[in-house]
Amino acid sequence: MKLLVVKDYEEMSCATAKIFKDIITEKPDAVLGLATGSTPIGLYNKLIEMNRNKEINFSNVKTINLDEYVGLGEENSQSYRYFMNDKLFNHINIDKANTFVPNGLAENLEKEAKSYDKKIEELGGIDIQILGIGNNGHIAFNEPDDFLISETHVTNLSQSTIEANSRFFKSINDVPTRAITMGIGSIMKAKKILLLVKGEDKVRAVKELLNGDITTKNPATILKLHEDVTIIIDETMEYKGNFY
Ligand code: F6R
């Protein structure tokens, strides 16, 4: 695991965008594993800018997202598909047919989850996966538990995640309680992983990841077993975490 300490969120977004640019330049049909939430928004803004400046061409790129709320469709402004269209896909020269987000409205959610892992395989695997981290250590919606699930699956969101995500909704009662999420194994198969950390409420989870043992109670700690993971934090997080 590598740790990259950057000055601030702006630098985190720039550094990540530069890594994306290098990967796409080398492999124009790269498969990008994407995330939603507040953390990657700066990255997406940089990618839009670089696409406008003709520094990155997305015409052959494929993307696959980590997760989607159960019960929300593309038209719902709280769905992750809507988020991705709104924050990235509508503004770059990507073919939307090459962008994949689990279907939260699927009639058979188990089948949808299974076919999602097949889709990743068909695409040839994920070249680079970005992750945010929950304040409870979740990655995608793999929540702390006594066990972790390897494949893409339907999951119940933990109370702490519902509370954290309620900031995006009118009321906490509007936050969906279930999601389809890539499993830990689906994520760990990615060739390269970048974990971006934004928000001081993540200090405890990141400290456990950097200094502690692997535990299902902090799903991010499993990343210690991946051979190409970079964790990007900013100087404030480094100072607050006193990680060394
Ligand atoms: C989003 C996702 C989540 C978020 C995490 C952090 O697709 O899978 O694991 O990455 O909850 O969210 P933010 O970035 O809003 O702090």
Image (cartoon, rainbow, N blue to C red):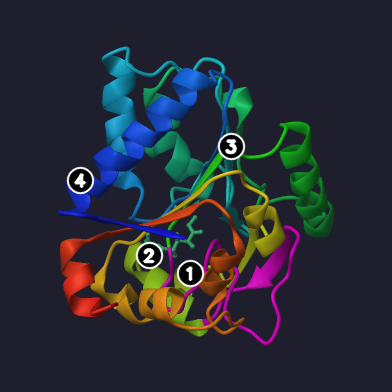
| Residue 22 to residue 12: above or below | above
Disc 2 target residue = 169
Nearer the camera: disc 4 or disc 1: 4
N-terminal of the pair, mark 3 or mark 2, is: 3
Q: CA distance from mark 3 to mark 1?
A: 31 Å
Q: Which residue is mark 1?
A: 175
Quick check: which quadrant has ligand 1?
bottom left
186 to the left or right of 158? right
Q: Are marks 2 and 4 in contact (CB under 8 Å)?
A: no
Q: Residue at x 80, y 42 (%)?
A: 118
Instruction: Give the Cα distance between marks 4 and 3.
Output: 22 Å
The residue under label 4 is 11
Which segment did they paint magenta?
Answer: 133-158
Pointer 2 or 1: first along the chain: 2
Name the kind of residue labelled 1 in the image.
Answer: Val
Report the disc number at residue 26.
Answer: none
